[in-house]
Image (tube, rainbow, N blue to C red):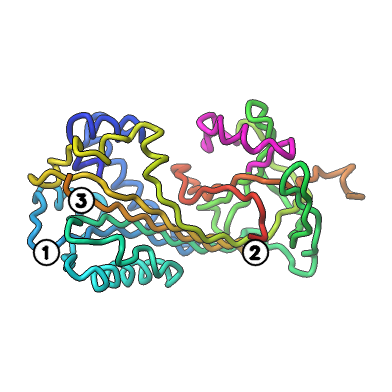
Amino acid sequence: MAAYGARGNTGFQIRQTLTLPEEDAIGQSGYESLITSLNDIKTVDLQIANKIFVAKKFEVNPDYTAITKDIFHSECETVDVSNPTAAAATINSWCANNTNNRIKDLLTPDDIDNRTKLVLINAIYFKGKWKDSFDGKYTSDLPFHINSNTIKEVPMMTITSMYLHGQLHNLDARFVELPYKGDEVSMFIIVPNKIDGLQRIENNIHDLDFSRLNQYGRNEEVILFVPKFKIENTIELNNLLQKVGMAEMFTDAADFSGIADTPLKVSKILQKGFIEVNEEGSEAVAASAFLVRPASADAVYKPVIQVDRPFLYAIVDSRYKSILFYGRIQDPTL
């Protein structure tokens, strides 16, 4: 949402980094279609919500509020930033209501002060059941290579079923697609061929195109081993975004004149995520806050895919191949 209020070099950096179209109308139309399409998915529980919290007496450009309302389905709500505890409680309550209470404390009162003018929130909640569920009676503790020197016993699910899988030679890795019921959403797992090969995948992640993976694989019956995992974390994205090219928006030179006449800059971008994968399926949640202030025996016959080392996962919608959730698992037990 912030991109469509950015101007000048600030807007250029955001658009270039996020590969947004130069013409706002094209990008806005694409986002509107994507959000509508994702909200129409009925075979899994997928909820996408956006919200703008505005400090009292701060005036937002009406054209910007129209864009956020019409394109991102985001309403504006005023909060009293002179009372950080109450403001944080209001924002966190909205976030909890839109993530099935999985994310309750996205912001703390320390994140808000009298200089805070806007808080842009994006929340995504997902819960889906596997198209082919794992049978819990076959889950057992098996070795998982945390790194090339450390092995840990972890609860490992197993199933024999039809999956799309294949090799990604440019990443020295293999992939497998686990569809959810209804075939509208899938989880892709990318496993390095070498135990310590995750870094190579991450360094070349731009080569990974989920819309083309079917060209590199085939559908066939495989024996699949996948660890159960549950991850919850909070990440401040400021440093990462500055490194990848979005630096100006954090400085006094930031230009968000499309949002308001008052000079604004980004003070902090937070993302809190939760994902749990088990025999029935998976549940995932992500919420972002954008704070703005002034300036075996069968192996002979069936391929075996063992996810027994650090790996990447992505939950992707089948129509647009848009990544809903994405992450890395270094240790499934943490």
**Residue plotted at (80% across, 45% down):** 304
Q: Give the residue type at disc 2.
A: Asn
Q: Is residue 292 magenta?
A: no
Q: Nearer the viewer, mark 1 or mark 2?
A: 1
Give whichever of 185, 149 is nearer the camera.
Answer: 149
Q: Is residue 197 magenta?
A: yes
Q: Position of residue 239 (x, y in %)?
A: 40, 41
Q: CA distance from mark 2 to mark 3?
A: 41 Å
Residue underneath mark 3:
293
Q: Nearer the viewer, mark 1 or mark 3?
A: 3
Residue underneath mark 1:
56
Q: Position of residue 99 (x, y in %)?
A: 41, 66
Q: What segment is highlighted magenta in the picture?
A: 190-213
Element carrying mark 3: strand
Q: Give the residue type at disc 1.
A: Lys
Q: Position of residue 295 (x, y in %)?
A: 17, 44
Q: Tag 3 or tag 1, which sits nearer the N-term?
A: 1
Q: Residues within 10 Å of mark 3 (few under 14, many from 20)?
A: many
Element carrying mark 1: loop
Identify the mark at residue 278; answer none if there is no mark: 2
Q: Quadrant of residue 51?
A: bottom left
Left or right side of 188 for 193: right
Q: CA distance from mark 1 to mark 3?
A: 13 Å
